[in-house]
Amino acid sequence: MNSIKQHATNIVRTLRERGHRAYLVGGCVRDLLLGREPADYDIATDATPAQVMDIFPKTFAVGAQFGVVLVPLLKAESGESAVGPDEKVPVVEVATFRSDVGYSDGRHPDEVRFTKDPEEDVQRRDFTINGLLLDPITNEVLDFVGGRDDLKAGVIRTIGEADHRFAEDKLRMLRAVRFAARFEYRIAPATMTAIYRLAGHLHQVSRERVREELTKMLTEGRAKRAFELLDESGLLKEVLPEISAMKGVEQPPQFHPEGDVFVHTLLLLEKLTAGCSKTLAWGALLHDVGKPPTFRVAPDRIRFDGHVEVGVKMAAEICRRLRFSNDETDQILALVDNHMRFADIQRMKESTLKKFLRLPGFEEHLELHRMDCLSSNGIVESYEYAREKLRTLPPEAIRPEALITGSDLIAAGYEPGPRFKEILGAVEDAQLEGRLASREAAMELVRREFLR
């Protein structure tokens, strides 16, 4: 038994010893019954938050008003955290059985009423497969909502009326899609009908929560199915209308025999592996976002003139709208901006090639290009060429130490100004191309080509 599961079991045991009812609940029970390793463990109990905090030596009352207390894993001997200062402390969420009254903000209950009845607590939860209780000591499962049958049948179904569950928290509509994709389940007809009817209400959810849910869809290894379900449910045009606009946008068959821009993007998403970086995943999703508005039929073929530049602007707006961090935005935009450059990689000057290969996170650029090729014409010559260059070129050849700096130019009598960038760039290009190898040679090039 791993340490966090043992910790959760010990919490249940301790609560029982103090006269309380306690069970594992939610996603961890679902995953255990599916033979998967849960990412975290939650406990439901009839103990109030005050009682939980009184029983355990160290707790965090992160949501006591909603009955939620975090109990960290501690060293048995000293009472200190069981991990180092830079590590994330494993915690178990302990929540009091409750019923919720009203959700006027579409996310939080207006009133929470604690209860002693585990069945009443389960009735407020989202989906039947997440509404199971498990006694970790006896392995007895309490199922008040038909969750075990839906696990066996592979069905995502709300607990009770779907309209009510989604009215309480609109994000549950996205979660239904994510769970269906992750587990390769189907969404129950009544649940899907409610999502389609209420999809427009998703705008009430914070953009950060939407972003995180979409990111999980993209990085859990079932991105293609997730976006198919987003489209079928009517949610895609609400959260990412720019991706929905790809449907039916034809591409030149000689380069894209697979079909339209949406089909191409789905094929690319299919190649995202579970656990891939969020920037690679979003770069893959958005790399052709500029194609729909730039589509035109020319005399020779279908064209998307300027789709990269337009795509970068559109991706920047999407990143702003979904409130990505600056660093994440920079990398996503770089992936969109550079994804077509691989077409010219075998014709690049040595200096241009080396600067391309040293782009931050270049492994993501390379992987996006590989997936892009395999999702269209299947030609990966440029990918293999880049890999071979990375294998044979030593790091110091790609990113050599500068031969001269601005200080050297000032010492040589050059006036500081915008031209310094041009001069230093020319020196670096010559160095990358093997035409310069010393400071003296670099200064000679400056004197020869950039008169004071």
Image (cartoon, rainbow, N blue to C red):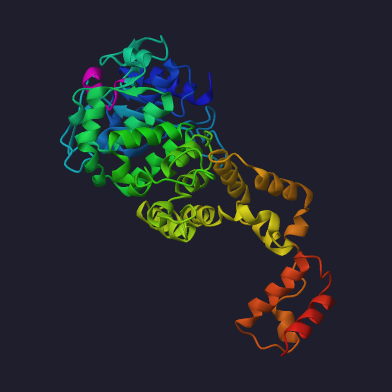
Residue range highlighted in magenta: 118-128
Q: Is residue 321 left or right of residue 375?
A: left
Q: Inspect this view and state whether residue 358 appears.
A: no
Residue 326: % across, % down: 46, 58
Residue 308: % across, % down: 49, 57
Residue 126 is covered by the magenta coloring: yes
- Would you place residue 391 above or below residue 450 in this image? above
Residue 133, picture quadrant? top left
The tally of labels here is 0
Q: Is residue 401 left or right of residue 64?
A: right
What residue is rendered at 64% in x and 76% in y?
421
**Front one among 378 and 205:** 378
What residue is rendered at 54% in x and 45% in y?
255
**Front one among 308 and 405:** 308
Q: Inspect this view and state whether residue 263 appears.
A: yes
Quarter of the image that includes the C terminus: bottom right
Residue 243 is covered by the magenta coloring: no
**Front one among 215 and 426:** 426
What residue is rendered at 38% in x and 57% in y?
317
Q: Is residue 1 left or right of residue 352?
A: left
Q: Residue furthest front?
A: 299
**Front one among 156 and 249:** 249
- Would you place residue 50 above or below residue 449 in this image? above
What residue is rendered at 32% in x and 41% in y?
236
Residue 67: % across, % down: 27, 32
Residue 224, picture quadrant? top left
Residue 53: % across, % down: 34, 32
Residue 294, picture quadrant? bottom left
